[in-house]
Image (cartoon, rainbow, N blue to C red):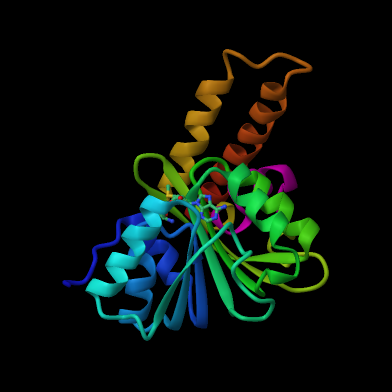
């Protein structure tokens, strides 16, 4: 089988993974684990799939690529088919943040020390979860696609996450501490779109009021950084 092509979203996920043994939870087509092995980002992968159609598709992809010695496909829900300590890292991608968080919360002691997450909607919930669960945000990417996708690499480390130091906390949780620090056109467009969407509906006491304040804070921060960079 020719090398499966990854879209920009899964390419970004791949670049945040380096592991001896990696698990891809909810893998569907199994393109990511195939490329992780082929491109030397992992020595072995475990694919976990809940649903029969995608499970069959993953099994077929692995057989076609003749990577059965490197990729094992398991049927099951989230981290349940894994033993504690069995994998170095895991990815959970292409699902809503609520679904991903449910999978992480049910994992308990099966959670590996590194996670690469790509929610299809806001990553805020996952950044909040990371703080509670003792994970730091080590790296982030923002990728244009059908939606604008945030990709997060989390690592289990004790203590407060230094990524947030010096940043407006609510804006950093919503838009990503590394992404906010890096600035960039894609993030600025995303924040401006949020301000435009929220301005007509925001009213005191509503969630949209707080969200608008957070978006404006992020925009001020991004604009301020741009001004500073231009002056220096
Ligand atoms: C939209 S697809 C994303 C596929 C791939 N990860 C990607 O990003 O392109 C979501 C996949 O996750 C699977 N899935 C959903 N919930 C799951 C769970 N709790 N455990 C394992 N797989 C799950 C679905 O069957 C589906 O194949």
Q: Nearer the viewer, residue 159 or 1?
A: 1
Tell me the quarter of the picture where residue 110 sits. bottom right
Whether residue 179 sits left or right of residue 156 in the image: it is left
Whether residue 134 sits left or right of residue 194 in the image: it is right
Q: Position of residue 87 (x, y in %)?
A: 58, 79
Q: Position of residue 44 (x, y in %)?
A: 45, 83
- Identify which residue is drawn at 55% across, 69% down: 90
For residue 175, above or below residue 213: below
Q: Nearer the viewer, residue 140 or 73?
A: 73
Q: Is residue 170 magenta?
A: yes
- Prevailing secondary structure class for the magenta stretch in the rendered image: helix
Q: Is residue 28 magenta?
A: no
Q: Position of residue 88 (x, y in %)?
A: 59, 80
Residue most extreme to the right? 159
In this rendering, the count of numbered labels is: 0
Q: Nearer the viewer, residue 19 or 149?
A: 19
Q: Nearer the viewer, residue 43 or 147?
A: 43
Tell me the quarter of the picture where residue 38 sits. bottom left
- Identify which residue is drawn at 57% across, 74% down: 89
Q: Which residues are magenta?
A: 166-179
């Amino acid at each position: 089988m020719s090398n499966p092509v990854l879209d920009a979203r899964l390419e970004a996920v791949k670049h945040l993974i380096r592991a001896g043994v990696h698990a891809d939870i909810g893998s569907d087509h199994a393109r990511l684990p195939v490329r992780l092995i082929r491109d030397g980002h992992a020595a072995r992968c475990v694919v976990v799939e809940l649903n029969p159609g995608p499970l069959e598709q993953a099994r077929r992809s692995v057989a076609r690529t003749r990577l059965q010695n490197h990729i094992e496909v398991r049927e099951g829900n989230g981290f349940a088919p894994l033993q504690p300590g069995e994998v170095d890292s895991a990815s959970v991608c292409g699902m809503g943040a609520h679904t991903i968080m449910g999978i992480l919360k049910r994992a308990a002691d099966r959670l590996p020390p590194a996670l690469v997450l790509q929610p299809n909607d806001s990553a805020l919930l996952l950044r909040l979860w990371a703080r509670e669960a003792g994970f730091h945000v080590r790296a982030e990417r923002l990728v244009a696609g059908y939606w604008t996708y945030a990709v997060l690499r989390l690592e289990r480390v004790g203590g407060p996450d230094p990524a947030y130091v010096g940043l407006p906390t609510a804006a950093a949780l919503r838009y990503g501490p590394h992404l906010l620090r890096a600035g960039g056109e894609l993030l600025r467009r995303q924040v401006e779109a949020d301000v435009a969407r929220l301005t007509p509906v925001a009213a005191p006491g509503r969630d949209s009021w707080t969200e608008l304040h957070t978006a404006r804070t992020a925009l001020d921060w991004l604009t301020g950084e741009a001004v500073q960079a231009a002056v220096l």
